[in-house]
Amino acid sequence: MTSKKQIDSVKFPETVYIISDKKYLDSVFKCENNKFISELEEIPNRNSNAYKITITSKNGQNKITKLLDTPPRMSHINYCNELYTVVGFPCGGPCYSRVFIFTDKNRPNEQYSYSQKIENNQNIIAYIKDEVFEKLIIHNFLNSKELIVDISDSNMWNYGQMDSILVKKNNLILYYECDNKKNKIKTIDLKTIL
């Protein structure tokens, strides 16, 4: 058995913690994909427009810089792809919101609450509007068309969050837990928003 004295005498190199802290900070404030590098920077002592995001193309031809009106000390990059970078933040209780900053510099940012990415399609997301957790809205970024899906049988404590969402051919497949604790798979035809 290890004594407290033995544990206290163990020396851990400080650089291990510095490196892991740096990796963690890089992971929440920097994102890279095949074409772009996104960097989020907090602007100290500001209550609004507290973050600056810079999206730079790897070929050096395009650079987008925008101020984001997201909460100070609470925002970070969730993920990025060739179409957009997503910055998320909590907004109270189970609420969270995500801002989509597009790599097309002429396209304005879009913000959605309780948004979920589709595992195999960056052009489509799902989100909840006005905390109506019985209705999942499917949004196509390419044409701004939307489809509402009834998920009133889902577990209410999931706040509209699916276990998994993916696209197969022209169908959206939802995997989620129902109120009766059973798992469900729901298939939705996407033709109306494609």
Image (tube, rainbow, N blue to C red):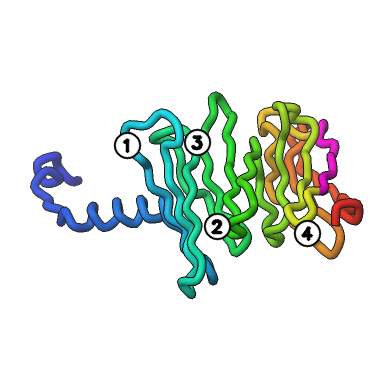
* Lateral position of residue 173 relative to residue 128, left or right: right
Q: Say whether marks 2 and 3 touch (CB < 8 Å).
A: no
The answer to whether residue 32 shows anywhere in this view is no
Residue lying at 74% horizontally and 30% vertically, measured from the top left: 133
Above or below 125: residue 4: above
- Residue 37 rendering spot, x and y as whole percentages: 47, 63
Q: CA distance from mark 1 to mark 4?
A: 41 Å
* Quadrant containing the C terminus in the rendered view: bottom right
The mark lying in front, picked from 2 and 4, is 2
The mark lying in front, picked from 2 and 1, is 1
* Lateral position of residue 1 relative to residue 117, left or right: left
SS of the residue under disc 4: strand
User: What residue span does the magenta drawing correspond to?
Assistant: 145-153
Q: Say whether marks 2 and 4 touch (CB < 8 Å).
A: no
- Residue 158 rendering spot, x and y as whole percentages: 67, 33
Tell me which corner region of the image, top left, top right, bottom left or bottom right, holds residue 51. top left
The answer to whether residue 79 shows anywhere in this view is yes
Residue under label 1:
44
